[in-house]
Image (spheres, coloured by chain):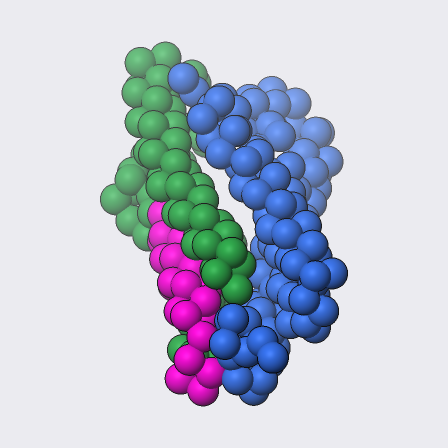
Amino acid sequence: MDAFTVLFDPLLFYLSLSMIVAYAALCGLSVAIFFRRRRRLLLLLACAFLILMVVEIGSFYFEPPTLDWSYYYLVANFGWLKFSLDYMKFAQQEFWLIFQSLNFLAIAVFGVAMLLAGKNRGELSKEGKK
Amino acid sequence: MSFLFDVASVLMIASGCGYILLAGVAFFSYKQSGSKALLIFLGAFITLFFMNLYGGVAGAYHPFDGNLLGYLFGGFTFNVLSTNITVTLLADITVKNMFVFETTGVIAIILFMIALYKA
């Protein structure tokens, strides 16, 4: 196994993929419960799970190095390619960072949802039902 | 062996800190409302904290010092033996770290599912 194939390891590939599907399922589940219970809190939770799903998709797509070890080979042999290769490498990292920073948005939405759950005294639980 | 905290590692640790703050908010809400589902949400947020912390620290960890990597990358002589050993070790460490990272994420998702079910 070399570094290029690390992120195409089948176990990691399917774990990442299952996380994306699971976040989508959580989002769908929250929306489904919202239609039954009509609690705004559930919409906020669905929104947070949707953001986390987008973060996972971003990690899944932009984490594997597009060039990896071949970058060093190409730079060593074709120096004139360095500018465009660096541009490509940094653009990939920037995109990864942009997607990861969406975690803070998810934290904010979750925070509002949690505050709402505390404020409405058991809205999330059965004892909150009338 | 060294640690190199780049932007990506710091960002992951910072989002981990955000999740631990969120766990605090969930605990505060639990104290107010007494809902058991909020306790499971708290558990999920703590798991996400550990996931991001692990990802950040493991991403910053370099099992070989910069000189060896610099030597390998700088000249690109493709010394087959040393390059293969280094690449294989790095790849193995990355796979193991990423497996722990992803598995922690899956645990958090399972906790979220239980919390939603309880709610």
Image: B20 above or below A47: below
Is residue B41 visible in the rendered image? The answer is: yes
Choose between A72 and B2: the one closer to the eye.
B2
Residue A42: percent from left, percent from top: 65, 66
Chain A tint as drawn: blue
Q: Quadrant of residue B102?
A: top left
- Residue B50 at x, y = what percent? 36, 57
Residue A124 percent coordinates (x, y): 54, 71
Left or right: where does residue A40 sit relative to residue A16?
A: right
- Please provide the residue range marked out in magenta: B31-58
Q: Colour of chain B?
A: green
Instruction: Decide which of B66, B1 is in the foreground and name it.
Output: B1
Q: From where the camera sits, is residue B26 visible? A: no
Residue closest to the far front: A130
Q: Is residue B37 magenta?
A: yes
Would you place residue B14 above or below residue A55 in this image? below
Q: Residue furthest top?
A: B80
At 29% from the left and 49% from the top, the residue drawn is: B2
Percent of width and height locating residue A37: 67, 66
In the image, farthest residue toward the left: B1
Residue found at x 47% / y 31%: A12
**B90 over A119 or under it: above or below:** above
